[in-house]
Structure formats: C-alpha cells, structure tokens
Image (cartoon, rainbow, N blue to C red):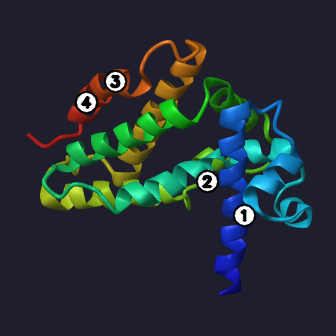
Amino acid sequence: MAKKKKRNTKGKIISAAWKLFYEHGYDDTTVDDIVEESETSKGSFYHYFSGKDALLSSLSYLFDEKYEEISEELPENLDTVGILLYLNQKLFFMIENEITVDLLSRLFSSQLVTRGNRHLLDQDRTYYKLLRKIILAGQERGDLRDDVSVNEIIKAYAIMERGLMYDWCLCNGNYSLAQYSLGIMTNFLSSYKCC
C-alpha cells in the first residue's frame, strides 16, 4: 500500500509539472507552482527530484502513463502492424497536443548530456514491456517475421519513433507529427511483416 501511495505522489508531481510546463512554459513554471498544482508538499517534491531540471527526464514517465492507458484499449481486430501503428498514433497525437516542441527538445537534450540513467532507453519502462508483448504475440500468430529477434524489432521501432520526434523538434513542430509518422511507420513496419 505504501509503495502505491509513493508512486501516486511522484506521479502527481510529474503530471502537474508537465501540465504547467505545457500551459505556462518551462521557464515560467516554479517548484512552488508544481507543488500547488500537484497538491503535495515541497518535502515530497525534493524527496523525488533535486530541482525542476530533474523533471526533464520524467517525460518518459508521462509517456509510460499514456502507454498504460492505451494498452487497455488496443483494438482486437487489428494485426500486429496495425496495433503498433495505433500505439504510435496515440502517443504522437498526445505529444502534439500536450507536449511543446521546446519541452520535447529539452528531454532529448537532457538525455544526451546526462551522466545518470537515460530513461528513454530503460528496458523496464512500460513502453518496452508493451512493445515486447505485442511483437512476441505477433511472431507467435505469424503476423511478423521470426527470423528477426523481438529485441531487434523493438530497438528499430524505438529508434524510428525517437528519430521522428527528433526531426519534429528540429523542424520546430511545423508539421503534424502523427500524420507524417503514419506513412513512415507503415513503410518501416511492412519490412517485418510475414509474406
């Protein structure tokens, strides 16, 4: 029970922070604003984070919350490629509507210079666990080639998604990330389909 409360407190802080970052911008959001919005305390904030900058790497936590939500609603009538495209589209629509280009850019920047954990690569994230489950089931059903390992497909998929997000940031979000990725990801994933 204590572990769930702990996770909820950290999750409340992260969700509140990213909501405020989106609404007011990163630079105009203070720790006090985050504590007030999350209905937690400064002590709780500093228990989980050394400061506002430490929240940058927590965007992967927010993504994982979205993946948990999406995993509950995956359409059963789609093949594996369809499910992966659905997952990609849901995440990228969320990014377009809830994460600014500046914040996503800061996440990538923080992951490049960090000396600590690179959260985007953490194989224990919900993201990687969900991909593993979907891809393994796809190989077992005969939707996906089995001459390529599950890990290789997961790595390639993650690289494609990060590349698309990175390009979107470089272009300052001047096109629809979800729309553009649909064509790219469809072509990419078709190479893993069984004939």
Instruction: Look at mark 3 in the image and give the residue it sits on.
Output: 179
Instruction: Look at mark 4 in the image and give the residue it sits on.
Output: 186
Q: CA distance from mark 1 to mark 3?
A: 33 Å
Which residue is drawn at the image coordinates 65% and 87% (left, top)?
1
The answer to whether marks 1 and 3 mark residues whose Cβ atoms lie closer than 8 Å is: no
For label 4, count other residues whose C-alpha is less than 10 Å away and answer few (under 14), some (14-19) or many (20+): some
Whether 34 is drawn above or below 179: the answer is below
- Which amino acid does the dot numbered 2 rest on? Tyr
Q: Measured from the top left, where is residue 125 in percent x and y?
A: 55, 58
Q: Point out the tag, 1 or 2, that comes first from the N-terminus.
A: 1
Total number of numbered labels? 4
Instruction: Look at mark 2 in the image and give the residue it sits on.
Output: 61
Along the horizontal axis of the image, is 129 left or right of 149? right
- Which amino acid does the dot numbered 1 rest on? Lys
The answer to whether marks 1 and 2 mark residues whose Cβ atoms lie closer than 8 Å is: yes
Along the horizontal axis of the image, is 8 left or right of 53? left
Instruction: Look at mark 1 in the image and give the residue it sits on.
Output: 10
Secondary structure under tag 3 reads helix
Secondary structure under tag 2 reads helix
Comparing labels 4 and 3, the label whose residue is closer to the camera: 3
Q: Point out the tag, 1 or 3, that comes first from the N-terminus.
A: 1
